[in-house]
Image: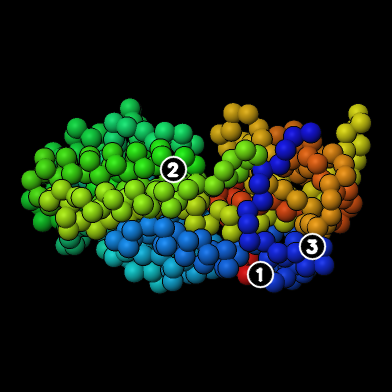
Amino acid sequence: MKPLGPIPPGFDTIDGELAIGGKTASVLAEEAGDTPLFVYSRTLLDARIAELRAAMPERLSIHYAVKANPYPPVLAHMAGLVDGFDIASGGELAIVQAAGIDPAEVSFAGPGKRDRELEAAIAAGVTLNCESEGEARRALAIGEKLGATPRMAIRVNPSFELRGSGMKMGGGAKQFGVDQDLAAALAREIIPTGAEWRGWHIFSGSQALDAEAIVETQANVLALAAQLADEVGEPLPKLNMGGGFGIPYFNGDTPLAIDRVGAALAERFADLPETLAETRFCIELGRYLVGEAGVYLTRIVDRKESHGQTFLVTDGGLHHQLAASGNFGTVVRRNYPLAIATRFAAEPDEEANVVGCLCTPLDRLADQAHLPRAEVGDLVAVFCAGAYGATASPMEFLGQGAAQQVLV
C-alpha cells in the first residue's frame, strides 16, 4: 500500500459526499453536464489570501502569477484580492487585458519574449522584467519606434538558490535573468535612455516548504538588491522578491509556516539600508494562492482486476493532471491527495490503483491506494488541482480535449 498525500483543510461533507461551495461532487458534475471537471472554491481562495495578508508585513504587496491558473473567472476573482499580476507570455497579456486588469499593475517575465510580445506589453504599459541584455535593447528600440516609454525592470540571476525548492530558478548557468555581476551595468545602460526604471526581479526557486530556507533566501534577495542599487547609484524603486512558497502534495509534507516567514521579513523591513528605504516590495505567488483551492473530479468508467490488483479506470488522467501522474518532473512517483468523492465519509476498505483513460502506462492517478470500495459511476477527487492542472497538462493528447472548469 502507498500512502496518499494530505487532503487540504476546508472541504465539507454533505450526505457522505465531498462538497465544494455548498454543493456535492455529484451535483457539480451534473450541473457541468460531464466529467472530467475542475472545481475551484472562492471560499478557499479568499481564506488563503486573508491568511497570507495576516502573516506578511503590511508593506509587502502580493502578486498573482497567472501561469498557475489563468481560468478567467479565477483571474477575475483574484483581481479583487491581490495587488498585481505577473504574466509570462503575450497570450497571458491578452487574458489579463480581457479581464480589465490595470496594465500598470502587471509585470511580464520569461525568456524568449518575441518582438510582437514586447511591443504589445510596451504599448499596454506593462512592466518588462528583462531576461537579458539583448532583450532589454530590443525593448528600448521598440519603445522608440512606438514613441512610448517602456517600463523596465531587470530579472537578476542570483548566485544563490532557494534550498529545498522543487524547481531552482537561480544560481549558476540559467536561461532566466541577467547574471548578478552584470545586472548593475545593464541598469546603468537603461536608466539614461528615459525608460521608466522599475527595479529588480529576483526569483531563485519554487515549491519550498521549509520556512527557514525561505527566510534565508529573502534575506539574500534583500542584500543583493541593496548591493545592486549601490552599484547603480540610485535608490531602488521596486523589488519583486519572487515567491517559492510551496504546498503539501505528498505524504509526509507539512504546510509552510508562513507566520515565521512573515515575522522574519518584518524584522528585515524594519532595518533596511537607505537605498531600499522607499522601495516598493512584492512577492509573486501562484501555486500557493490557488493550488489547494482546486479539485479535479473524474468519473470511474470501469472496474477491473489484473493479477490480483484492482484498477479503477476513470474518464480523466494525465492529460489534465500531468503532475499528479508523476510526469511533471517527479523522480520517484508518489500519490497526490485523492479520494472517492461520492464516498468521502466512508472508511477505506480496499487497495486500488486509480488510472486514466489513455493508452499509456504512465496514466496513473494513484498507485496501491487505500480507498473505500468504489464502483462504476463513482467520482474520484484529485486535490491540490488548482494550479498547473488544466493548462499545464497535454489536454489534446490522444484527442481527449480539455476538461470543464467551474468556480463555485
Where does residue 92 sit, x and y in percent of width and height? 43, 57
Disc 3: which residue? 17
Q: What element does badge 3 sit on?
A: strand
Q: Between 186 and 53, which is closer to the camera in this rendering?
A: 53
Q: Are marks 3 and 1 in contact (CB under 8 Å)?
A: no
Three-letter residue code for mark 2: Ala
Give the mark nearer the N terminus: 2 vs 1. Answer: 1
Where does residue 336 sit, x and y in percent of width and height? 66, 43
Disc 2: which residue? 211
- Residue 54 position by quadrant: bottom left
Where does residue 57 sit, x and y in percent of width and height? 33, 58
The image quadrant where one finds the N terminus is: top right
Disc 1: which residue? 21
Measured Cα–Cα span from mark 3 to mark 1: 13 Å
**Residue neighbourhood size for the residue with mark 2, other residues' Cα within 10 Å, grouped as few (<14), some (14–19), many (≥20):** many
Q: What element does badge 1 sit on?
A: loop
Q: Would you say 321 lies left or right of 90 here?
A: right
Q: Does residue 159 sit above or below 248 in this rendering?
A: above
Q: Residue at x 36, y 33 (%)?
A: 161
Three-letter residue code for mark 1: Gly
Q: How is the image coloured?
A: rainbow
The image quadrant where one finds the C terminus is: bottom right
Where does residue 341 sit, x and y in percent of width and height? 77, 57
Count the numbered circles shown.
3
Q: Residue at x 51, y 61 (%)?
A: 48
Measured Cα–Cα span from mark 2 to mark 1: 31 Å
Q: Residue at x 34, y 38 (%)?
A: 216
